[in-house]
Image (cartoon, rainbow, N blue to C red):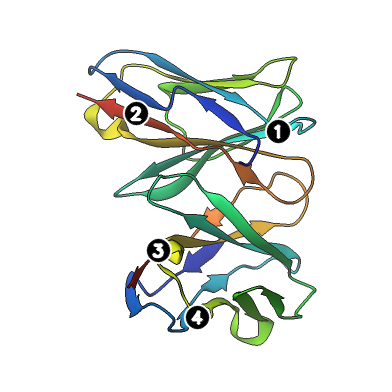
Amino acid sequence: AQKVTQAQTEISVVEKEDVTLDCVYETRDTTYYLFWYKQPPSGELVFLIRRNSFDEQNEISGRYSWNFQKSTSSFNFTITASQVVDSAVYFCALSEAGGAQKLVFGQGTRLTINP
Amino acid sequence: DSGVTQTPKHLITATGQRVTLRCSPRSGDLSVYWYQQSLDQGLQFLIHYYNGEERAKGNILERFSAQQFPDLHSELNLSSLELGDSALYFCASSRGDTIYFGEGSWLTVV
């Protein structure tokens, strides 16, 4: 069975600090997708990134970067120079590739950026 | 804005009642998904429809049902509501391998 673990329930940092959100996953599939979603206080789920299991290149998008390591089954998310607007709950999710794409979510990490 | 539209945004109803949540997927997306987010269960997959056909079922209660219509919009019907059904219900859609979520429908059962 697929499982996603976000061990950090809550993180609080001061603005401009760098912060890394951890995500560890379990799957028996050889091909799968990993996702990060952001849920701001307003409640919507905002897609941030999708990574294919066969593509282990790290990705950077502005202040956001993602480190995918298949060897440790981890897909960590780093925010550089954090801002108050980054305050949200962040979810890591896993799905099988192709077919019915049921997402299995982690429990989420509540990130608070203090001014 | 993800392009997925959900109505109503907020709903308060009494136990034992029935409600219908509506979802319009992104233009051109054939897949529609329903998810439930509650404090104790987190985000849980309920059901997936593709072009009108049910494709996968998750932890969906028998009191709940869904359908996808020919115009691709979808409805989630929740009946005999209980206090524990209070949650944020998300609809999502996809065309390829990325799933985009709507803003959710907040359901409160009192």
From the top left corner, tell me how far across and down residue B98 is, in percent: 71, 51
Q: Nearer the viewer, residue A34 or A12?
A: A12
Q: Nearer the viewer, mark 4 or mark 3?
A: 4
Please name the residue that numbered disc 1 is placed on: B26
Helix or strand or loop: what does disc 4 sit on?
loop
At x 34%, y 74%, the residue is A11
From the top left corner, tell me how far across and down residue B33 is, in percent: 61, 36
* Outermost residue toward the front in this view: A115
At x 65%, y 73%, the residue is A62
Please name the residue that numbered disc 2 is placed on: B107
Please name the residue that numbered disc 4 is placed on: A81
At x 76%, y 34%, the residue is B29
The mark that comes first in sequence, 2 or 1, is 1
For marks 2 and 1, give the CA distance: 23 Å
For marks 3 and 1, give the CA distance: 27 Å
| Residues under numbered marks 4 and 1 in contact, where contact means CB atoms less than 8 Å apart | no
Kind of residue indicated by mark 4: Ala
Please name the residue that numbered disc 3 is placed on: A87
The mark that comes first in sequence, 4 or 3, is 4
- Chain of the residue under label 1: B
For marks 2 and 3, give the CA distance: 24 Å
Instruction: Establish whether labels 4 and 1 are both on one chain.
Output: no
